[in-house]
Image (spheres, helix red, strand yellow):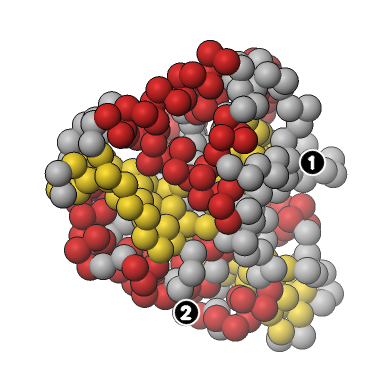
Amino acid sequence: MRNILLNADININFVNHIDKICANTWQNLNSSPCPFLQYDFFNTLEKSQSVSAKQGWQAHHLVATTNNEVTAVMPMYLKSHSWGEYVFDWDWADAYKRNGIEYYPKLVATIPFTPVSSDKLLSSALKMNELFEPLIAHCQQQNINSWHILYCDEIKTALPEDVYQRNTVQFHWFNHDYETFEDFLNTFNSRKRKNTRKERLSIIQQNINVRQLKNNEISQQDLEFFYLTYQLTYLKRGHQPHLSYEFFKQILASETDNILLIIASDEQEDIACALFFYDEAQLYGRYWGCTKPHNNLHFELCYYRGIEFCIQNKLKSFNPGTQGEHKIQRGFEPVLTHSYHWIKHPAFREAIKDFCQQEQKHMLTYQQQCRQMLPFKTVPLKNVP
């Protein structure tokens, strides 16, 4: 594919498979402990066919080189739909369709099916905003209708006029040096504290047993049960699951120390589970499913057990996934996420720019409203990174 010259020293091109990037090169550029930015994670997505051109996720990874040495990588995909992104632009696509204009293909920098904020650009030589113009040039050359950089770090510098910022709100838990779950609970007002204790007690009263497994403790039978519940979660919503069984099998084999599976059982029959990833500082809640509904079991497995794991392992924060205002009363604080967008079609730019600006104001207001709903005796002044 045609190279783009960023300046006299740096060339940018795009590759259609991760195996065209050396694993050691990727890892040397990657300074993040986040498990979803590791080479093995993206490689497993592609090898398991969970992302592919057939699935509407054609790999189109950005690679920058200086004197034939790779100095930056950004995982990107050519998309023919908007599933699995969690920064929703379906209304934009519908507006295009109503006007007889193609919205796809679009170019998206993201971790597939993983709405976790991180610096999507792996480099110490380049900054994200330096790529805006090369990405625009590439889209113009290749007849790509837009580009989108999702769940990235906030860009503090002024944006070009035709690049728009969007914000969403997620709910994260922060560890303020708690020694026990009870220490955390003691920061709640009395009514919310009582309600949480009641929810947790109900698990005992229902005679539900819970076990926690890490990596090599997870058997094939455990993994098969997890995948069954994972499938059921999607099928209940009328969708096919995004990730294949082979993906989870391979990622479990390649990741040695950052997967947590929590399984609940009733009379020795497994009935529900939640899968997490973690690194040296953060826990990431990813997937939940059940074969039988039980009161408060989702809260116990997905939230309370995760909080306990963070406290026990001195992790600083817990990202349980997108959306869910029910997380607020359980001590998860609203945080803003950031994404950046460029639209090729000139007739839609102004309308989308106005939408993004109005949405941003709404999200800031919504974040403050959510903060007032937190269960703490004293609302924290700010989130702890």
Query: Is residue 261 something that shows in the picture?
Result: yes
Quadrant into which the C terminus falls: top right
Residue in the image at 77% along x and 74% along y = 10
Q: Quadrant of residue 23?
A: bottom right
x and y percent of residue 188 in the render?
61, 23
Residue located at (71% from left, 22% from top):
379
Residue 127 numbered tag: none
- Front-most of residues 320 and 47: 320
**Which residue in the protein does label 2 denote?**
19
| Residue 135 picture location, percent across and down | 66, 56
**Left or right: 245 with respect to 79?**
left
Q: Nearer the viewer, residue 369 or 215?
A: 215
Residue 139 picture location, percent across and down:
59, 54
Residue 333 relative to residue 246: left or right? right
Tell which circle, 1 or 2, labels the residue nearer the N-terminal end.
2
Please say if 350 is above or below 129: above
The N terminus - image quarter? bottom right
